Amino acid sequence: MIYQPQKYKIEDKAMAPFIDPNEIWDYINGFKNPSTERVLEVIDRALNKNRLTLEETAVLVNTTDPALIEAIKDGARKLKEQVYGRRIVLFAPLYIGNYCTNNCAYCGFRTSNKDQLRVTLNKEEIVKEVETLEDAGHKRLILVFGEHPEYSAKFIAESVCTVYGVKKGFGEIRRVNINAAPFDVEGFMTIKEAGIGTYQVFQETYHPETYLEVHQGGKKRDYDWRLTALDRAQEAGIDDVGIGTLLGLYDWRFEILGLVRHVNHFEAVYNVGPHTISFPRIKKASGYAIDQKYAVSDADFTKLVAILRLAVPYTGLILTAREPSHVRDEVLQFGVSQIDGGTNIEMKGYSNRKPEQNLNAEQFEINDNRSLQEVMTELIEKEYIPSFCTACYRLNRTGEHFMEFSVPGFIKRFCQPNAMLTLAEYLEDYASDEIKTKGYRLILDNLEHYPDDAFKEKLIERLDLIKKGQRDLSF
Ligand code: SAM
Ligand code: SF4
């Protein structure tokens, strides 16, 4: 199936979503053993806020000299500090249903896995999960679904509305994102009307042959239908989209170039890149048997996150609880801008938390099962500002990821103050006395160095109002 957005004439290769595997390999093989000068030149281009080309990304993925890998990580660290500051956005995944008609070799939900306990949350069960998440302090969720006729666009839209309707105490979910199977344009329109934030579809692997090997049955076997999913989402008016690759299926260098090629396509056709990029590594799942040939080591993983940060400086990078906390700690410094916290991916697992993970009741194994409170404490102690901000989405400022990056002063005027305001809400409503003290100390430290006096006044006023009980006071 060839997808051609109606509005545009295909003028160059990037206008077409399709990826030529030979072309990607030509880049990887064509820029082997890059010189020190060339690697430093590419890092410099990224630090000057240029999105890297495929050729430049190939130079970085081919860098093996440890000193140059450190230079890549240093560059990413600098860029992250310059562009995003020390904010880390927090969210939680909520699995709504794990029935699935596909047979993805890596996933515990695959249809051939008869050991998996199948569940679809009804409205009352969704409410119960959301109340528990609100009680912990969450404001942003991503709803996750298997692919099944029961999970129609209408069903997903209804689930979203149910979530937005749950308000417990000060609790309120202000942004609902989706990770579900691709729809047609009409289906995406139905979901958009429910007021979603981002729609995520991961290509899993950009390598067509591998794609067919691991997607052994169901609609997901159609590589092109999946690759063009977010074009249809755009066509339906969903302009916040998230792409991703599942690391461990094929050579990670190929997948990184695949992601950058996908970004090029969005820029060429829609004039804006994706909102977020995800790059999960495959984890153990119920009964799964994945060849370890392409397993990505911690060393390659941390390197590739730094490369992504440099290659697509304006795109949010998401890391999930699939990764252990020591890996998270490292990549938070130089790449990642969003993480989940207090994650439980067992069906109905938030309201019914069990001491042990049960792979037959969840999609895969997670490696970070700390509570949101523990994650918040650690972030605060490391002087990151945990943020639950949803202001741009709620004020209709779409393309915020791009504005953060390209509009001078945007972060100073919006993102940073909003991060502090949402942190203050959390400290007032959900934190222990100890975290409250540490959190306010962090806010005060940040205020001390706040560069704009007039604006600082406004921010202090709002922080006082939050202490007095007002909520949702964003800029
Ligand atoms: N069923 C939808 C789909 O496949 O697009 C929703 C997504 S699935 C529930 C969420 C994502 O989890 C998948 O896109 C895949 O990248 C990831 N995933 C699946 N199995 C995994 C595993 N064993 N380890 C890590 N991530 C996995
Ligand atoms: Fe189903 Fe998605 Fe799992 Fe594939 S990855 S088996 S489509 S839930």
Image (cartoon, rainbow, N blue to C red):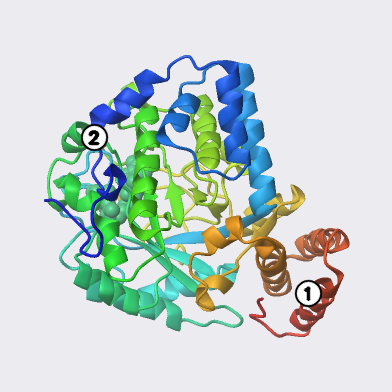
Q: Please tell me which residue lies in front, 384 or 371.
A: 384
CA distance for labels 2 and 1:
50 Å
Asked whether disc 2 touches disc 1, contact meaning CB atoms under 8 Å apart, the reply is: no
> Quick check: 345 above or below 282?
below
In the displayed structure, would residue 211 be above or below residue 132? above
Instruction: Relative to 274, say whether 398 is above or below.
Output: below
The image quarter in which residue 213 lies: top left
Residue 94, image x, y percentages = 41, 63
**In the drawing, does residue 107 fall left or right of residue 103?**
right
- Reading the image, the residue beneath label 2 is 20
Q: Position of residue 405 (x, y in %)?
A: 59, 55
Mark 1 crowdedness (10 Å alpha carbons): few <14, some 14-19, many ≥20? many
Query: In the shown orientation, is residue 337 left or right of residue 187?
Result: right
Check disc 2: other Cα within 10 Å, few if <14, some if 14-19, many if 20+.
some
Question: SS for tag 2?
Answer: loop
- Taking depth in this image into account, of 390 and 98 the one nearest to the observer is 390
Please provide percent x and percent y for residue 128. 43, 74
- Locate residue 329: give its quadrant: top right
| Mark 1 residue type | Leu
- According to the picture, the residue beneath numbered tag 1 turns out to be 459
Question: In percent of the image, x 51 and y 48: which residue is there?
Answer: 317
- The residue at the point 70 percent across, 85 percent down is 470
Quadrant where the image shows the C terminus: bottom right
Q: Is mark 2 within 8 Å of ligand 1?
A: no
Q: Amino acid at mark 2?
A: Asp
- Left or right relative to 429: residue 404: left
| Residue 65 x %, y % | 57, 15
Vertical arrangement, residue 292 with respect to residue 422, above or below: above
